[in-house]
Every structure is written in C-alpha cells, then in structure tokens.
Image: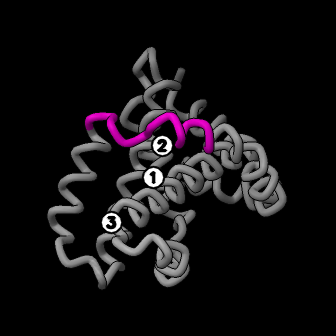
Amino acid sequence: MEKEQLIKEKFQKEGLVDSISKYQIYYQMALGTLVKETCFDKDEMASKLEELQLDINVENVLNVMVKLITNFYVDEDFEQIYEDNIKVNAFLHSLRDFVDNNTDLTNSDKVYDTYHEKIMNDEFFDIKMQLQFVDEVEDRKAYWKDLITDSVSKEILSSALTLAQ
C-alpha cells in the first residue's frame, strides 16, 4: 500500500482510536509492571503509581504512528510490524518516563538497561499482560472514541500528511 493511503487509513477516526487506545494500554501496563517489580514495599505500589502521574502524550503517539508508516509502508508485513512497534514504543516510552520521573529509583541505569533488553528481546509482554490487554481494549477504545471527534481527526490527518512529506 502507498504511504499516503496508509496515513489516511491510520489517521481516520477509527484508526486513531485504535492506535491511541492500544498505545495507552501498553504504556500503562508497562508502568504498572515496572512499579510492581521495582517497588520493595508492595503496599506502596498504588501510591507510587499515583505519585508518578504518568500517562501517554498523544502527540508522541501520533509522531510514532507517522514514523512507523514512513519507515515500513513498503513492507508486505506492514500491519504486523505496525502493531508490534506500537507496543514496543509504548513500552519504551513508559520505561523512559518511569526511570526519568522516579526519584526513589537508586539504580536507574541498571533498571533501564535490564527492562530495555527484556522489551527488545520480546521477554517483557507476558501472558498476564496479554489477557489484561484483551480485557481492556474495547473499553479504552470507547473512551477515545468519545474524545476524538470527526473534526479533530480531520485536523490530525492533515498534519500527518504534511509531516510524512
């Protein structure tokens, strides 16, 4: 498929809702896992998540989408590559945000390197995460569907087409 056609497809309202929803779930699951696995006091996990107040930046997600389309649009396995990279990028953004914003983390370089390696070697996304993803994706899509209006999606599409030139 041509690059412009893929951008039009992925940046229509439904495509935006789908990609942003997935990215946000992956991001939040990774963040939860990072807190759970690096927090010594299990009772403090919820308060640590609250304290960090991290979530996706939609502009970052949109930029990732454009980059993925631009880099891989000629690949015959584009859809699989796109889906895998949405997940990996969300995990990596979550990891970077977690390490950068967690002032209690004493060995941040080691934590970053360890989890970066797990993510890149596809050893991070376990069966529990897969089940949680499936369980949450439709609710998250409903949330974003209410936020992304037709006019907003048209503006985003126009920007994406300009960026991809």
Label located before the other in sequence (1 or 3): 3
Q: Mark on residue 38?
A: 3
Residue corresponding to mark 1: 90
Q: Quadrant of residue 105?
A: bottom left
Frontmost residue, 44 versus 119: 44
Quarter holding residue 81:
top left
Please tell me which residue is depicted at 70% across the width and 47% down the height of the picture: 136
Task: Read off the magenta span.
Answer: 121-132
Identify residue type, mark 1: Ala
Residue 164: x and y in percent read 46, 46
Which residue: 45% across, 70% down? 42
Label whose residue precedes the other's in the sequence (3 or 2):
3
Question: Callout 1: helix, strand or loop?
Answer: helix
Q: Give the crowd class for mark 3: few <14, some 14-19, many >=20 residues within 10 Å.
A: few
Do the residues bearing badges 3 and 2 touch, measured as CB atoms within 8 Å? no
Which circle, 3 or 2, is nearer the viewer? 3
Residue density around tag 2, few if under 14, some if 14–19, many if 20 or more, within 10 Å:
many
**Which is in the foreground here, disc 1 or disc 3?**
3
Q: Is residue 105 visible?
A: yes
**Spatial separation of the CA atoms under disc 3 and disc 2:** 24 Å
Examine the structure image and report whether residue 123 is included in the region drawn in magenta: yes
Image quadrant holding the N terminus, namely: top right
Q: Nearer the viewer, residue 137 or 47?
A: 47
In this picture the colour scheme is one colour
Q: Are marks 2 and 1 in contact (CB under 8 Å)?
A: yes
Residue 86, label in figure: 2
Q: CA distance from mark 1 to mark 3?
A: 19 Å
Q: Is residue 66 magenta?
A: no
